[in-house]
Amino acid sequence: MKILDKLPSQLLAIAALRWSIVFVFAFFGVAKFALYEAEGVARIAMHYPLFSWMYPLIGVQGTSNVIGSIELLTGALIALGAWSHRAGLLGGLMGVCTFLVTLSFSFGVPLWEEGYGFPFMGSVAQFLFKDAVLLAGCLAVALHAGHALRARGTA
């Protein structure tokens, strides 16, 4: 059991989780400003009640820019959580909401590869299902920040 006594702090795991989530939000957020990503998102989001009203108002690229800006803000808040638990809590909760929304896209779209069926995922399922892990990661970051705020009596 001596090796278990030499394990690094769980804070190392939270830091690794934080920065990997920031990486995802940064690159996916920036991608939303590109036409190829805006069109890809529109194929799913255009018919989703949360976003459908935006498309007639600001178009495919405008809607994607809004989504990308929210993703970049979420990533920035999660990054700031390394120094500010309040920012980390807010960013983590925004991430949880982000991935709850994207996972809800799973309802009503074809998820299984045509001609094969379950368990052979189509490209939409492959894109969406990874968000379950990202949701759990954002939840872990938010809970870590929330517990730290409570321990300091600043919640």
Image: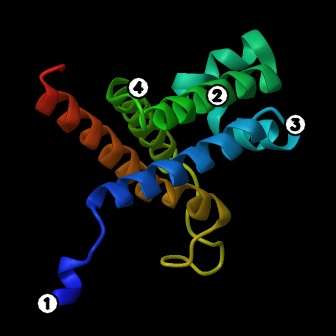
Instruction: Give the mark, 1 or 3, whose residue is nearer the N terminus.
Output: 1
* Residue 67's disc number: 2
Residue 25: quadrant of the picture = top right
Question: Taking 27 as reference, is 150 left or right?
Answer: left
Kindly state the secondary structure of the residue where label 1 is placed: loop
Name the mark on residue 87: 4
Image quadrant of residue 145?
A: top left
Q: Residue visible at 45% across and 37% down?
A: 95
According to the picture, the residue beneath numbered tag 3 turns out to be 35
Three-letter residue code for mark 3 = Leu
- Measured in 3D between alpha carbons, the distance from the residue under mark 4 to the one under mark 1, in whole angstroms, is 38 Å
What is the number of the mark on residue 1?
Answer: 1
What residue is drawn where x is 27% and y is 62%? 9
Describe the element under mark 2 as helix, strand or loop.
Answer: helix
Q: Give how far apart the Cα atoms at labels 4 and 3 are.
A: 31 Å
Q: For the image shown, how many numbered marks are present on the structure?
A: 4
How far across and how far down the image is residue 63, in percent?
Answer: 71, 22
- Neighbourhood count class around disc 1 (C-alpha, 10 Å): few under 14, some 14–19, many 20 upward: few
Circle 3 SS class: helix
Q: Nearer the viewer, residue 22 or 93?
A: 22
Q: Amino acid at mark 1?
A: Met
Q: Earlier in the sequence, mark 3 or mark 2?
A: 3
**21 and 15: which is toward the camera:** 15
Residue that appears at 66% across and 41% down: 26
Q: Check contact, mark 2 vs mark 4: CB within 8 A.
A: no
Instruction: Give residue 24's position: percent from left, percent from top.
Output: 60, 49
